[in-house]
Image (cartoon, rainbow, N blue to C red):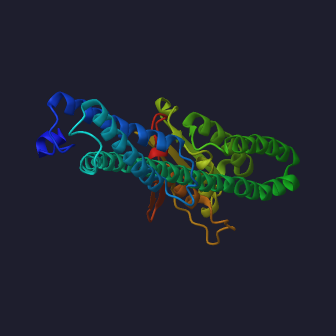
Amino acid sequence: MNIRILGGDRLYQADLTYDKLFVTVVALCYAVWFSNFYIEKFAGFDPKKFHPLLVQFLGSLVAVSIISFLSVSITGLILGEPYNLSFQNLILTSGFAFRINLFLNCVNAIFFFSKKFKEKAVEAEKLHTFNVSARLETLNSQINPHFFFNNLSTLSVLIHENPVKADEYLQKLSNIYRYILNNRDKELVTLKEEFGFLQNYIDLLSIRFKDSLKFNLQVDNDLSNLMLPPAVMQLLVENVVKHNYFTIKEPLEVFIKSDNKELIVKNKKQVKEAVEFSTGIGLQNISDRYRFLGNEIIILDKEEYFEIRLPLISANEDTHSRR
């Protein structure tokens, strides 16, 4: 088509008939393609010293020169004059063959760089995923010392005040810590699992504070299979206990309820004058973990109450691609 459209059908000094021209063109195109294929497949080279496309192109120049010489020689033997081997015929045939070779090498270069671009994109995505996983693992690992540190002091007080309650506290603490260890490598757990864990933690608080700290739980059972990061509920409740005072006369009630696909933790503000020691993890940890999952928590710090809204994530949501 290139020859017919551009009128460049002079492969030799004299015009070939259409049938002979067709056979010659097909033979030349196939020979040039075949030589490039085998150069790419079998040529040995060090990619650090020589670019593969450069080796391919230089090798194809040599191959195409040989193909052109053989084409003119074979045509001369079969058809005779004026198609025999001569400088003019060799130049014309070589010009056509090198055009075909240049086209094939351009296509090969496009394919080569397209493939490299995809490989780099995959490598970049793998690196990004690795970095995200490493950072998320770091965030999850913060929960363990944070949780353990805050409860050792509580256990220490109970050992002196009520050894029996201290033993019960220690047993529940062991169950809770086991849950944290078992789920530290998970990005998400079901709401049902998290609430089972939360209930154990509420039992610990009830042992320590009795009726001065109350919990109002109103969570739709239909949401039990939705998911959230592990131990976030414990961190939120612990945050309430840390920043608010409560007594038998002035109890503090914590509301935990569901609203569509959100979990709400809300409490009336009874702010302590002096807040106990904080490791600075808490809300920032939860916020960072949700951000890695492509979500954001909502924090409402009003004059009379404090409220946190946590998105609940469906099991079929592709959080990895959003990250």
Q: Is residue 143 above or below residue 225?
A: below
Q: Position of residue 320 (x, y in %)?
A: 49, 45
Q: Is residue 6 left or right of residue 72?
A: left
Q: Position of residue 1 (x, y in %)?
A: 17, 38
Q: Position of residue 223 (x, y in %)?
A: 48, 33
Q: Nearer the viewer, residue 77 or 317?
A: 77
Report how many numbered discs are placed on residues in the image.
0
Residue furthest to the front: 81
Q: Position of residue 215 (x, y in %)?
A: 58, 45
Q: Nearer the viewer, residue 239 or 279?
A: 279
Q: Is residue 17 left or right of residue 291?
A: left
Residue visible at 72% across and 46% down in the picture? 204
Residue visible at 52% across and 47% down in the picture? 255
Residue furthest to the top: 19
Q: Is residue 294 visible?
A: no
Q: Is residue 170 left or right of residue 7?
A: right
Q: Is residue 77 visible?
A: yes
Residue furthest to the bottom: 273
Residue visible at 36% across and 49% down in the picture? 105
Q: Nearer the viewer, residue 237 or 79?
A: 79
Q: Is residue 190 above or below residue 126?
A: above
